[in-house]
Amino acid sequence: MPAEIGVGLLGLGTVGRGVYRILEQNAALIAARAGTAVRVRRILVRDPHKPRGLDLPEGMLTTRVEDVVADPRVQVVVEVMGGVRPALDYVLEALRRGKSVVTANKDMVAEHGRELFAAAERYGCDLFFEASVAGGIPIIRTLKASLAANRIYQIMGIVNGTTNYILTRMSREGVSFQAALTEAQRLGYAEADPAADVEGHDAARKLVILASIAFNSRIPLEQVYVEGIARIAPEDIRYARELGYVIKLLALGKETPEGIEVRVHPVLLPSRHPLAAVHDVFNAVFVRGDAVGETMFYGRGAGELPTASAVVADVIDAARDILRGVPGMIGCTCFENKPVKPMPLVESRYYIRLLVDDRPGVLAAIARGFGDHRVSLASVIQKNTIGELAEIVLVTHRVAEGALRAAMAVVEGLTVVKQVANVIRVEGEEE
């Protein structure tokens, strides 16, 4: 049995510092659980002179990746750099040299999972990525191991803390999207360029990872339908509440006979649904399986220590596998090749907010436009009068996206309809 398992860190930013701190502070506990000591040996950084608030041994920092991946004392390489390049090249080189890899890099895993898993299998190494989705929530391991006996039918997740914080502030304070975003940036929850978060792309990458595991079939990122939250207005929040819903940005995956649904967009979610109670920067993933039924996993989806907690847990698993001589036992679970369901075939209910002329016959014209495309309306409510215009909220019965889009094209073209203020899908309930 090795006297220790050596770790090489690629990156020493927020998460990297957390990984180092946990490995140092909990060294005795981790050694007992892993079966041997686990110690950081080398760390790759861009600037070795930058203050980091850590008491690091002399010579541990390096600016050369070869000093980490080629060090014979390093058996596990932890990638916490972020971004696709050069992280992908460094990870592939580590695997080629027989080092097991732990990564928190959702972009790299979502875009290059096939290549990474092929390399891990070829060289007989572990590739762990628990921290790539939902920070400290153990959802990857749960889907791969704890729920392995189940056929997973559906996953729904709040997997982006920035957008959840924004929508929480809009809901609680009645502020606009822009005001909530500005506050999130001031508090450090949102980047100066928040596009990846508020446009849904961050959640889409996480959904690719979750859906590929849940449905045992690799999901191409470009086939995920993505829609952000910038069009959500305080009026939508208020009307949703009156109708018994909250608005959340969800990552949704569902297996159907026509293929796998994978989509990220705002939804009206029943206020009684477990995900409706997930507020601020917290994340949660709701899973429905044939044997287990409905389960939900909740916690902090980002931050130094929550994310580092998931990384170190993967390091412990990698260390155990090395000690047993069986690294690479749990590889890629994408052993099927299922189609992705085209978005026009996806069925949902819809909330629609319109500004229309405030005069007789308008509702009949709108109802006829929907009816001609077999879109059935569950409710039609006039909410406010704004000058000579009326604000109308409609909720449809379940209908295919393609039919809804065709109907909306007709309705939007009616002279009595002045603006389609918003269209939001309704999820989380059965008709």
Image (spheres, grey):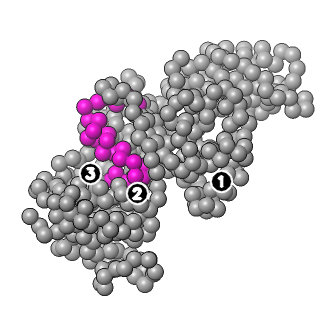
Image position of 9 (left or right of 429): left
Query: Where does label 1 land, which residue?
Result: 181
Q: Which numbered disc, 3 or 1, marks the residue that appears first in the sequence?
A: 3
- Whichever of callouts 1 and 2 sits on the residue coming sooner in the sequence is 1
Disc 3 marks a residue whose amino acid type is Phe
In the figure, residue 334 lies in which quadrant?
Answer: top left
Q: Would you call the spot at circle 1 few (<14 residues within 10 Å), some (14-19), or many (20 or more)?
A: many
Q: Is residue 17 above or below residue 105?
A: below
Quadrant hosting residue 64: bottom left
Q: Nearer the viewer, residue 68 or 429?
A: 429
Measured in 3D between alpha carbons, the distance from the residue under mark 3 to the one under mark 1, in whole angstroms, is 37 Å
Q: Residue at x 8, y 64 (%)?
A: 1
In this rendering, does residue 123 appear at all? no
**Residue furthest right as drawn:** 387
The x, y position of residue 231, in whole percent, is 67, 42
Which secondary structure lies at badge 3? helix
Residue 136 drawn in magenta: yes
Q: Which residue is mark 2?
A: 307
Under circle 1, the secondary element is helix
Q: Which residues are magenta?
A: 129-154
Which of discs 1 and 2 lies nearer the camera? The answer is 2
> Could you say where residue 423 lies in the image, as x and y percent from the top left?
65, 32
Please name the residue that numbered disc 3 is placed on: 117
Query: In front here: 309 or 240?
Result: 309
> Mark 2 is on which residue type?
Thr
User: Residue at (52%, 24%) from the top-left corner?
Assistant: 429
State the SS at label 2.
helix
